[in-house]
Image (tube, coloured by chain):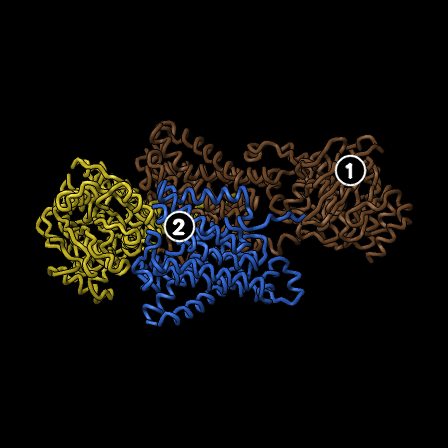
Chain colours: A blue, B yellow, C brown
Amino acid sequence: MGIQLLVTGLALGSMYGLVALGYHITWATSRTMNFSQGQAVMAGAVVAYGLHVALGWPFLLTLLGTLVASALFGVVIERLAVRPFFRSASLAWLLATIACGTIAENVAMLTFGKDARAFPSALATRPVLIAGAGVYPQELLVPVVGLALMGGVQFFYHRTFYGKQLKAVAYNPEAAGLMGIHIPRAVMTAYALSAALAGAAGLLLAPLLNVAPTMGTIIGLKAFAVAIIGGLDSAGGILIAGFLYGLIESFVAGYVSTGAREIVGFAVVIAMLVVRPWGLGGARPTRRV
Amino acid sequence: MRFGQRLLWVLVGCIAATLSASDLAAQSTPVKIGLAAAMSGGSAASGEAIRRGLLIAIDEVNAKGGVLGGRKLELVVRDDEGNPTKGVTIARELVERERVAAVFGGLHSTVALAQVPVWHELKTPYVGAWAAATNITRNGHAPNYVFRVSGNDDYVDKFLVGYATERLRKAKPALLLENTPWGQSNEAGLTKWFADRGLKTVGVEKFNWNDPDMSPQLLRLRQQGADLVVLVANAPEGAQVVKSKAKTGWEVPVLSHWGISGGRFPELAGELSDGVVFFQTYSFFGSQNERGQYVLRVLREKFNVKGPEEVTAPVGTANAYDGMHLVAMAIEQAKATDGPKVRDALENLQGEYRGLIKTYRRPFTSEQHDALTDQDYLMVVWKGGKIVPVK
Amino acid sequence: MTARLLWAVAAAVAASVPLVTANTYYLYLGMTVGIMVVITSGFNVLAGLSGQVSLGHAGLYAIGAYAAAILATRWHLALAAALPLSIALTAAIGALLALAALRVSGPYLAMVTIAFGIIVEHALIEWVGLTGGPGGIFNIPKPTLAGVALPLPRYYFVVAAAAALALWMTHNLMSSAWGRAFIAVKGSEIAAESLGLGTYGLRTAAFTISAAFAGAGGCLFSFLNGYVSPDSFTLQTSILFLLIVLFGGLGILAGPLVGALVLVLLPELLREFLDYRLIFYGGLLLGSIYFLPRGAVGAVQDLWRHPPRAAAAPSAGVPSAWAPAGAPAGFASRPAPGPGRPLLVVEDLWVAFGGIQAVADVDLTVAAGTVHSLIGPNGAGKTTLVNLVTGFSRPDRGRITFDGVSIIGLAPAVIARRGLARTFQTPQLFEELTVLENVMVGVAGHRLGSLAAALTGRGRAEAAALHREATALLQTAGLGDWADVPAGALPFGLRRRLEIGRALGAGATMLLLDEPAAGLVPTEIAELDALLGRLREAGLTILLIEHHIELVMAVSDRVTVLDEGRVIAEGRPEVVQRDPAVVEAYLGSA
């Protein structure tokens, strides 16, 4: 039982971590984020379903199409909900992104339909055994892709010129602007990247979760909790927090009760914010006067 | 201050005029029938299924000249969003503004329970087409305005327990329920009826909507030594349950409430859907009676439903279809659309209605407000994506 | 006057609804609006005044509703008894949540409150024995008042009265010292602290008030519907509260009323388009953020008072000078404690940030009743030293005493209350408040009176005294003509003046001025020079950080020179001016 819970928790956790990375990417560049990241995951899954199942596109083409469509979704969110309120002291962007997500959910309901559909995948039909614990191969794919994407993100930010520019924008937008970095474009790129990541997550999770207009809400919320626990500025912290959160969920459900799962999970989030608001992987911020 | 007073009177006048105008409008010819169900959100498919059943029956009645000597039936649909507060608002709106003769209800038991006092306060008959919580119809009101053409969890649970003990001969049942009022109502019913047979459930586990993985719950039930899992879930979560069960490698029979009856269940669960036994009030698979053929034809022509495997939430359509015909008969018999008269007619319905689910003779009495009981349920099993009766 | 008439009309219309219709659908909608007004009036205090956003108020609403339901079903309490109890319980839980939640802000605060809402929702589902589980509680008795049954048309008046009371209380609060303090905290946390306001405590108070209002709304809800179940208290509900306040107008009294009316009634009018409900909802949210930054009420107000508020500014662009000669009013009554003796003493002060010594072994003694200047090249550690003294940063080691008592480790607000006030390099004004109100925040300081008095509008005598004192100070500062201008619209040259005036209002015995001459034109510098002299005559002690050497030389009794975090010279201005080390430091950095 313990091993099965461990495997389940890790699979869940990699899912949360993967989606949570999307929050990190836009936060690291713009100090804003898409509160509808869950709906971006849903949009990715719905688009992938449309391309792969309805239109019969082959998988690689579907992947490409999903990434492009999701990136566009990110650009729309940025234009519509973030840019007008960028760096305004209020949380207008937070509400505006929630609004965009709500609209996206309704659009999905009108186009995709209201009920859940299956996304066929050869990797999610038969479980395999690992150390006596059953797991669908697709679930193993999630952490692999998650780690690869995290590596990619880290490489992009720390090793490429453009990535360093994006990071500079967050630390000091005035200076970055003076250095000739086009800030709106940098923020837009971050949003496109973040939404593409969410879309990839949607495609990856679709065979495991079923595709439905409402599929994103809970995932987006838990991924947000994970991003906060991990530290919005730390991709590594987020990935670790994802695994931790998945394990907490799985073991609380396995040894205490399912009902206690959300309560414990979100209580950990509050405790974490009280004790260490900057997150597992973040650095303590200094107060500016 | 003078001006203020005058303005106030103008405003009061305006409001009064609007109100009386709308009251007059409500008296015009069509007989309005309300539907208060979830039309958006995770349970939207259930509301849509009920709406289809009602529309098909209404078109049938209207094609034959309507009711009360030529008055057409007209459906007024409201979204309760699965929220009881919203449910109470639309209940009052349907009765007080739209002046509906009767209201059909949707999937959420909390909404239905919250509305029960409103129907009685406003004296309007309500016919449940889905929500199965026992105390919706057994609500302690007399006269009782709440009727149901659907499952009643108490009967359903008796039926399921009978099957589990007599046919499957299992002695260590475990419950796996969705964490909703529906799950709660069945926890009570199943526990009661198992106890009636001298059995105790070895474990009770719950899950939330959109939960991605149910393995921890199944592992706990396995540890507690269960030899049967009684499942109360809708299609998406039901599919997750059988997928997680395959992962844990636990070979245990699953006996299910009707939530997994939607045609999407085999699509979502794949080959794992095979062998899951559950109960139905009606199945669009297999040979159909005359009404069944008719309903399927209309579903195909009007709603682009290609076959029984595409009928999502079939119980909603079937229950609503029969319920609508019963209400139309009651209005005819009452010769009026007033709530108390229609209610009395429903309780003393004369004649016979050869319906989709069964043939109804005096479906409701003052003691019995459920038109369908365990006598009318049938046990079926998923096989190759189709529902076949259990022999 | 127009506003009063409008309120009277609104009240009359609200009261006449049950008289013109017995249709329970309209009554029910009216009561739903009323309950929303109660909740969102409190939410307006939190979000509109103190500037905190909560996405978990559905959890508090739920606690109020369930408390009432349980009290009514198990203990058979009537409305009049259940209401105060559910308010008290919700307020207590809200206060506890605030103590945890308000250590963070922005998206982090959003997360804490979301998490709280979810925890409450699941606790209601799981705690079956108390809450009835997912099915909730369904047999709440009909409301009664003094034994008389209240059917819908009568209960309507209870709800309407509660809504009116909620609006009246927020109105009182907004024009009280508490209300100004909330807005000050939203405007500039550090400035509020420098005036002695405890920001954490104020935020907690605002949160607790909003929780109490949500609890009242929950109780009214339970008795209206006769049932409670967890489905009514989801994240969507929390977002609805926010949307109501935002749409109506953040921080505007009538905002919740207009927002609740629109957001409760509009979906009813648009119900034909139920498939597009979420698009409509999202579109409204987006549209109101875009086009109505001050909400619907704010937009109407702006149209009404065209041109907008700033036009109240004096037409002459030339500011009047500081009032001439004589001790400035408002603080003359505070004599310096024993002129000449050491007032502020700093010893061996040391702080390093990330390996860089910002302040190293600094000793500094400021004598009472003197003007003491602190100069040095950029990055010498001057502002850091001020931050250490005023509590905004903690030193790694060293001693700081003020008036003979150690102030190391004290919160900025506590230090400010001991009589140590400061200004900032970039003036930190409370931009939403008027110039006069800015000074009133300073004059009141942390002495806000009782919160109950603020909510019920008592304490008018104190308010009048406060107003007089602040007005006198403004006259002294030469800002009398600007009293009713929003501070945000004040010209740059006057912003610093207001900041100093506000600090004086806070009753300082010592002022720390961080580059007050920066950005001023020569005539303004001359006025500043004169002012500093007068302040010293009035008995104040001043620590002046300044780059403007002429000013320093003219006004200072003593000068301390910092370079790279260390004191390199100290003494009378003309001596320091000739010190080779000082010349070296300035030339070296030039």
Q: Nearer the viewer, mark 1 or mark 2?
A: 2
| Residue sitting farthest toward the left | B351
Secondary structure state at the residue bearing disc 2: helix
Secondary structure state at the residue bearing disc 1: strand
Residue B292 pos. (x, y %): 14, 60
Residue C347 marker: 1
Q: Which three-letter amino acid code belongs to the residue tagged 1? A: Glu
Q: Quadrant of residue B53?
A: bottom left
Q: Residue at x 75, y 55 (%)?
A: C317
Residue that numbered label 2 is attached to:
A9
* Chain of the residue under label 1: C
- Crowdedness near tag 1: few (<14), some (14–19) or many (≥20) residues, C-alpha within 10 Å: some
Q: Disc 1 versus disc 2: distance between alpha carbons?
A: 56 Å
Question: Can you say whether A245 is above or below B201 in the image?
Answer: below
Left or right: B237, with B327 as reference point: right
- Crowdedness near tag 2: few (<14), some (14–19) or many (≥20) residues, C-alpha within 10 Å: many
Q: Quadrant of residue A258?
A: top left
Residue C362 pos. (x, y %): 78, 42
**Whether residue C272 is visible:** no
**Whether residue B339 is visible:** yes
